[in-house]
Image (cartoon, helix red, strand yellow):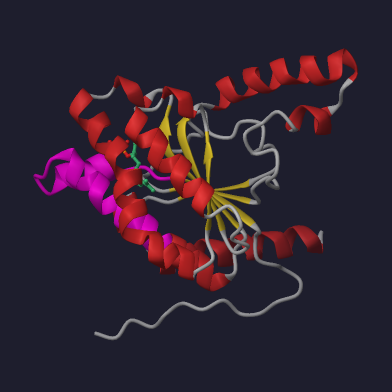
Amino acid sequence: MFRRKVSLPASDASPLPSHIAIIMDGNGRWAERRGLPRTAGHRAGLESTRRVIKESVRLGIKYLTLYTFSTENWKRPAAEVEFIMSLPGEFWRRERPALEEANVRLKVLGDINGLPLATRHVVEEAVAATQNASGLTVSLALNYGGRAEIVRAARLFMERYGIMGNEVDFATGLYTAELPDPELLIRPGGERRISNFLLWQLAYTELFFVDKLWPDFDGNDLVRVIEEYRGRSVRRGGL
Ligand code: FPP
């Protein structure tokens, strides 16, 4: 059956968001519902990530920030953690040509010193290799926690500005210092929580909770959420 591609109508009144953040949730449940190991869900989740990056490039989104591994995720069974930690390397080795072709810049948010050495090296390699790309910036939040980020920023703030600094000064100490705040947060997987993601940066962000699990989320779902976001911003503008 031919499924029509959802397309975005052009509109000056409701521009595309420049920065979309996503909490990629539901991989484990996706696998369990199929009687598969949770790692199969993470692998399927990686495919969703690839599709959503591709669609973001097509749409001309400037920044995509993906919650890939939180500071709380270390509590999972060691084998699952190890599997997730192998995915950045797998992703980079497999997708490098496509990422370079699409002019994608990779960035990492979080404490990379806490990552297994092999994971840290591969993400550092990917970040260095793509640093001059001028298309979509994909930021992977890895060993990331919002509160830990704020504490780190507070230390930098005191060193750099003392007690006289302002909010703009504070934000220079966040991992996202060079990124605009996201206009849009998407959380698939049915939960309605922020889960310690981008606590500072989400202050004015529109939140979209989607029941689909991350491995079932595709480019058309992304387009639908963006259309709803544009509808919300038109309504706000009309008030
Ligand atoms: C949350 O689902 C998902 C994770 C903790 C892993 C996220 C990793 C990916 C989506 C792969 C992408 C990786 C790269 C390198 C881009 P969950 O396991 O909490 O699902 P559940 O809530 O159903 O248990």
Looking at this view, name the residue that lies furthest to the bottom.
Answer: 2
Q: Which residues are magenta?
A: 23-52
User: What residue sits 47% from the left and 40% below the top?
Assistant: 124
> Above or below — where is 232 with respect to 178?
below
User: Residue 186, can we see it?
Assistant: no
User: What residue sits 82% from the left and 34% below the top?
Assistant: 168
Is residue 57 part of the magenta span, yes or no?
no
Query: Is residue 199 left or right of 35 when viewed as pictured?
Result: right
Looking at this view, name the residue that lies furthest to the right.
Answer: 164
Q: How many marks?
A: 0
Is residue 37 part of the magenta span, yes or no?
yes
> Which of the two residues, 234 or 80, is positioned nearer the viewer here?
80
Overall secondary structure of the magenta section:
helix
Residue 100 point in image, percent of width and height:
47, 64
> Which of the two residues, 66 or 35, is positioned nearer the viewer here?
66
Q: Classify residue 70 by image quadrant.
A: top left
> Above or below — where is 44 with respect to 169?
below
User: Residue 1, can we see it?
Assistant: yes
User: What residue sits 57% from the left and 61% below the top?
Assistant: 136
Q: Quadrant of ligand 1?
A: top left
Which quarter of the figure is the C terminus placed in? bottom right
> Above or below — where is 202 with respect to 21?
above
Residue 40 point in image, percent of width and height:
18, 46
Residue 9 point in image, percent of width and height:
61, 80
Q: Classify residue 156 by image quadrant.
A: top right
> Above or below — where is 1 with respect to 76?
below
Query: Is residue 38 left or right of 167 when viewed as pictured?
Result: left
Residue 188 point in image, percent of width and height:
40, 48
User: What residue sits 55% from the left and 71% below the top?
Assistant: 59
Q: Classify residue 82 by image quadrant.
A: top left
